[in-house]
Structure formats: structure tokens, C-alpha cells
Amino acid sequence: MKSKLFGGILLVAGTSIGGAMLGLPIATAKGGIFNSSLLFVVCWLLMTFTALLTLEVNLCFPKNSNIISMVKATIGKRGALFCGTIYLFFLYALVSAYIAGGQDVLRGLLANFGLEIPLWLCGLIFVFIFGPVVAAGIKHVDIFNRVLMILKLGALFLLMSLIAKHVDVNNYQSGSINLLLPSFTVAITSFGFSIIVPSLRNYLNDNVKQLRQAILIGSLLPLACYVAWDAVIFGSIPLGGEFGLARLTDINQPVTGLIESIVYYIPTEKIILLAKFFTSICVLTAFACVSLGLSDYLADGLNIDNKKSSRVWLTIATFVPPLLIVMFYPKAFILLLSVAGVLCVLLQALLPTVMAWQCRYVQKNQMNYQVVGGKATLSLAIVTSLIVILVSLINLF
């Protein structure tokens, strides 16, 4: 496999497998293993199809075209202003969620060494350490992401194999599909990787075959990991009880709480070390990839070039707003993933479908690549997206 294609696959997977993965067992626990696995498949189908539509639309325009340019060309200036503002809130919500998860993990690690520092300071340290990687651009993010993804996947598979020995099948009997509906938004966000598509296009130099492979293979990795991860967590940790999964939605540090639950029910040294190592790096890949998407989005919208002086202001615009959100609302992790989930369906499922319809059937643009399916398929995607948005809003409010 070519090096850039391999990097592209890991960028897609890394955008997905991150802080949201740590939130999945917490958000989907009440739904049970079968229902949550079905939910993951539905979310994967919808979000992978619309990610390919994002690629289709993006290829109609010059390189370095991001969402603002695409919306302006397909829907108009008013549509670009409306969607651009919402997209900005969406990206800020995601980066905020990953900073919240990162500061949670960092505080837990420092506590092991006897260092007790405020949660907000952990968030500041987290961004100061890893923000410069994003500021350096996609090549540096790719190298950073490759190393962490290999370490993370290796740790995940080893951790799951060790936890699987402690699975109690009786734990799988709990759960109801009705209780799963509130977790729809978190599950959708876990496949919200299409924000990286415009950056990925530049990285792979308009190679359509490699772009399709990166999206399809890169999205299948998270699907497999999510199903397996929920299976071993649900099987080894019961829903109720003092250290059960149900309690995690109501505490300030849910990621740390998940580690505590794993340690309580499976108190072996290897699993404790692996759990801490896995959660320590889990947030980093998604933080880097999503922050890169936000940075490129701001550069497109604000017409910022790649000069060093401009990159400084771009970095400030990328990280200061989400840092402030997390400082003033430290319990932001699950809530921000839920809010981002609603916006994710609107912007990464509904919007690409509408733009693809405009490009194909209204403007009749010259298409360099077209996703399989005609008006019926696009209509189905639009209706599905609207239903998911409605259900998500009902559960959120």
C-alpha cells in the first residue's frame, strides 16, 4: 500500500477513533450490545455515503476549496453565511469536546504522580503541547497521526483481548432500543470524518481512486473498533452499581470514570496500564485531525495564506474559543458530543446531499467523480438525515 494512501486511511480513521470512542460505551450502555451495534452500522452507512458526496462536490472546484467555498458556489451567498456559521459552531464544539476529554485524561495521569492541578489548567497545557502539531500543517499531522494510530490500535486490540477474558454474557441481557435514542448524536459524531475530506483531497493530489479507498477503508476501521469495544466493555462492566456504566453520564470526568470502572471490575496490572495508555492517546488523533479541519476551514473562510505570520493568528482563532468553552463548562465532554452530533447530521449528511443535488441536477456541473446512485438515493439520504435531526433534537432538548 502506498505511503500517502496509508496515511490517508489513518487520517480518516484517526478523525473518527478518538474522544468520541471513549464516550460511546457511556452513551450507548443503556441500549445494549445488539442495538448499539445496529446503530453503528446505520450511522456508518449514512456518514460514509455523505462523505463520498462531499468528495464529489469538492472535486467540482479548485484545490483548497473548503465548505464555505462549496456552499457559496452551490447554494449561494446567504446559504454560505448560514451554513458557514453553523459549521464553525460544529467544529468548535468538536474541538471543545476533545479538549475536554484531553484535559480529563491529563488530570488523571498527573494525579497518579501526586500532582493535583485545576482542570482548566490541564486543558491549557494540553493545547500548548499538541496545538503546535496542528499549526505545522497536514504533513506533520499525518506523521503524528500515523505513530499514534499504530500505537492506539495495537493497545486497543491488546486491551480488548485481555478484557474479553472477563466478559460475563449475562451483562449483555440488559438494554433497550428506546434507551438508545439519546445516544444517536454521539454515535453520529463518531463517524463525522468528512470534515477532513477537503484537506485529504489536497494531500492525495486529486487521486480519486486513492481518495475513495481512504474514505471506505478508513471508515470501516472505526466501525469494527466501535462494535468490538462496546462488546468487551458491556460484557465486563454491568450497567448498574456503584462502578456501573449508567453512572458515568452524570459525573464531571466520565473518561476517568470509565477507567475506574475497568480497573474496579478487572483489577489486573496489565489491563490498568493498557487502559490508562489507551485513553491517554485516544483523544489525541481526533483532536489533531478535527483541529486541522477547523484550521483549514478558517483559512478558507478568512482567506488566510500559509505565511508564518498568518498561521499564528489562525492558530489563535482555532484554539482560543474552544479553550474558553471548556474552561467555563468543564462537564462539556458528553454534552458537546451530543450538540456536535445534531450539527454533524445537518452539515455532514444533509448539506453534502443538497450540494450534490445542486451540482448534478440544477447547475449540471462537469463531474470529475460521481457517487453511485441517482435522485432516489439522494432523496433517501435527505429524508433519513431529516429524521435523524428531528430525533436528535427531541432527545437533546
Image (cartoon, rainbow, N blue to C red):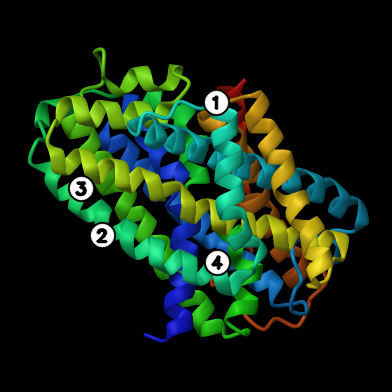
| Percent x, y of residue 153 | 30, 58
Question: What secondary structure is marked by label 1?
Answer: loop
The residue most toward the right is 77
User: What residue do we see at 83% from left, 71% from top?
Assistant: 305
Disc 1 marks which amino acid? Pro
The residue positioned 21% from the left and 23% from the top of the image is 238
Q: Is residue 132 left or right of residue 37?
A: right
**Is the residue marked by circle 2 packed among few (<14), some (14-19), or many (20+) residues within 10 Å?**
few
Query: Disc 2 or 4, which lies upstream in sequence?
Result: 4
Mark 1 and mark 2 in contact (Cβ < 8 Å)?
A: no
- The residue indicated by pointer 2 is 154
| Distance in Å between CA atoms under marks 1 and 4 | 28 Å
Q: Image quarter for residue 354?
A: bottom right
Q: CA distance from mark 3 to mark 2?
A: 8 Å
Q: Which residue corresponds to mark 1? A: 118
Mark 1 or mark 4: whose residue is earlier in sequence: 1
Q: Nearer the viewer, residue 152 or 55?
A: 152
**Distance (Cα) linking label 2 and label 1:** 32 Å
**Which secondary structure, mark 2?**
helix
Tell me if I can see residue 27 in this picture: no
Residue 208, visible in the rendered structure? yes
Would residue 297 be found to the left or right of residue 101 on screen? right
Q: Residue 159 — which label?
A: 3
Residue 214 locus on image (x, y percent): 47, 73
Q: Nearer the viewer, residue 352 or 379?
A: 352
Q: Amino acid at mark 2?
A: Gly
What's the CA distance linking mark 2 and mark 4?
Answer: 20 Å
Where does label 4 land, which residue? 141
Q: What is the three-letter code of the residue carrying label 4?
A: Val
